[in-house]
Structures are given as structure tokens and as C-alpha cells.
Amino acid sequence: MTKKRLLSGIKPTGRTHIGNYFGAMKQWVDMTGEYDSYIMVADYHTLNFIQDAAKMRDLVWNMVVDYLAVGLDPKKVVIFKQSDISAHTELTWVFDTLVTVPFLMRAHAFKDAEAKNKEISVGAFNYPVLMAADILLYSPDIVPVGQDQKQHVEYARDIAEKFNHIFGETFKLPKEMIMESVAVVPGIDGRKMSKSYNNYIPLFAEDDEIEKLCMSIVTDSSGDVPTNVYAIHKLFRSEADLKQIYEEHKGKYKILKEKLIEDVKAFVKPLRDKRRLIAEDTDYINQVIKEGGERAREIANKKLAEVKEKIGVL
């Protein structure tokens, strides 16, 4: 029986953090055998944030290294750069002729930027349309996302339905997949862990950085359990284990942070060591990018050709 297909990806806007891992990457690795997986480096989306060629190249290359270091196997998973597949931007234009400005103005990211009186680029405003193209080109059954990305998958479905209604059945309607236990991974300040908030613990951090960041986790003095410390700690240990630790050291915030540090270090070290080895093999990394692009392009171009025929330009 043909496997169902999965499509997901991360914007390479900075260092990969434990929120990226537990919120997305771990699920991709765990589902490798179950799904035909396409994992993207969303570099064109990153262009909304990074407009420096040397920095962009470095971020993209390191994102691929990170994907491999966490256990994504390029023999089983298609790892590719968004920018290597021109069908993404071409399909975005087709979709742009179907969607309306009021439709895009309902996007959470746009409303948030507008509320902060930010000057919004067309790329930032149009982000959901490019993301819809990213998704729909590959006809995925599921798109694993965090809670904050759910609306983008809904947008993709809405756009697919509109295209199908006007031009005939073309796109599969994707379904978001949200792992409730990690729908929102907390940062060291209690907000969602995010590069934009600078409240993250890097996935491949050195020991001294782990110590510094974990000791800086925001706590309150209203109870025996430091909420933010516990919320991060349960990513690394079962709640049954934690119950005993937190009972034994009730109210001792420094000791509990030290316990967290021990567990984060133990988790990160083998990943960090593996990443260091992979990063040394530049030819291998480049080969993974090249072959992944070829495999993704074949799928995307086939769907784009179908679209072009439906709209009458082919």
C-alpha cells in the first residue's frame, strides 16, 4: 500500500533550538517509516528576515546539517531547499490571482505586525500564499505544525478548495497535525520558545551555554514548583520521574535548575558530537541538497504542469 505523504520544514533564521526539535523535528524522525516525507529548508520565507547573502548561505547549509544530525535519513526522507524549486514561486503567483486582500488581512502574523505598527513588506503579507504553494505542490496528507502555524494550513486548504472549484479537482486538501504535548514549547521567559524572542536554548549548545541559559529561566516565588523550569524539564524526563525530583526539592529553585541542566547536557551532547562529524563532510552535505532538490523538483514540476494545463497556459 502506498504510504501517506508528509510535508514540513523550518525557516533557517538562526540557530536550531530545542523548541524546533521537540515541536517538529523529533516527530519527523519518528514518522519516517510511516510516511513518505518531504522536509524543506524554507529559505525564501527566511528572506523576509535575512537579507545578507553570506549569512543566508551559512544558515541554509547549517539547517541541512541540523536535519541530518537529528536523524533525518536522506535515503528515506527528501531534504530540499525551497529556493531550488522554482515551482513554489510560480504557483504562488497563480494563487495570488485567486486570493483577496481581506482574506490575507485575517492572518494572525499580519494582524500582529499591524498592531505593532510595523512596516509590512509584500513578502510578509503574502507569506500564507507562498506557504500554501509549498504545501500543495507535494499533495501531502499531513503537515506537522505547531499551534501557531495551524492557520497557515487552513489557508492552504481554503486556497486549494477555491482553485478546485474554479478549475476542477487538482489539489489534495492537507490536514494539519499538531502534537498537543508539544504544541507550544516554552522558552526561558515563559513565552513560546522562538528565535524572534531570543528566549531559546540551542539544540547543539555547548555545556557552558546550557548552564547560563537554564540558570536564567524566569521563575516566580508563588509556589514550590518553578513553572517555567518544569515546563522545559518535562521535555527531557517523564512526568513520573519529575514528580519525585520536584517533591524532593520542593521550593529549591537553584537545585531544580541544576537538575534540568544535567538532563539537557546529557541529551544534547550526543547530538552535538554527531553534528560536528557530519559538518566536516562538506561534499556529503552538498550531495544531500542536490539529490533532495532533484527529487522534490520532479514532484513539484509535475503538479505545476497540471495546474498550468488547468488554467490554460499549457
Image (tube, rainbow, N blue to C red):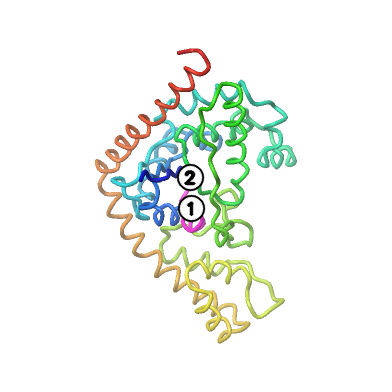
Nearest the viewer among 97 and 312 is: 312
Left or right: 220 as drawn, with respect to 128? right
Any mark on residue 10, and which?
A: 2
The local secondary structure at tag 2 comes to strand
Q: Find residue 269 and report its image quarter.
A: bottom left
Nearest the viewer among 94 and 127 is: 94
Q: Are marks 1 and 2 in contact (CB under 8 Å)?
A: yes
Please tell me how crowded label 1 is: few (under 14), some (14-19), or many (20+) other residues with Cα within 10 Å: many
Left or right: 41 as drawn, with respect to 127? left
Judge whether residue 118 is colored magenta: no
Q: Residue furthest top?
A: 313
Nearest the viewer among 136 and 105 is: 136
Q: Amino acid at mark 1?
A: Ala
Q: Residue furthest front?
A: 1
Left or right: 44 as drawn, with respect to 81? right
Residue appearing at x 51%, y 37% in the figure: 46
Up/down of 178 relative to 41, above or below: below
The local secondary structure at tag 1 comes to helix
Q: Where is residue 172? Give x, y as percent.
A: 51, 35
Please tell me how crowded label 2 is: few (under 14), some (14-19), or many (20+) other residues with Cα within 10 Å: some
Up/down of 182 relative to 102, above or below: below
Q: Which residues are magenta?
A: 11-23
Residue appearing at x 53%, y 17% in the figure: 311
Q: Where is residue 288? Give x, y as percent.
A: 30, 41
Residue appearing at x 42%, y 52% in the figure: 28
Q: Where is residue 297? Give x, y as percent.
A: 37, 30
Left or right: 283 as drawn, with respect to 4? left
Any mark on residue 24, and which?
A: 1
Q: Amino acid at mark 2?
A: Ile
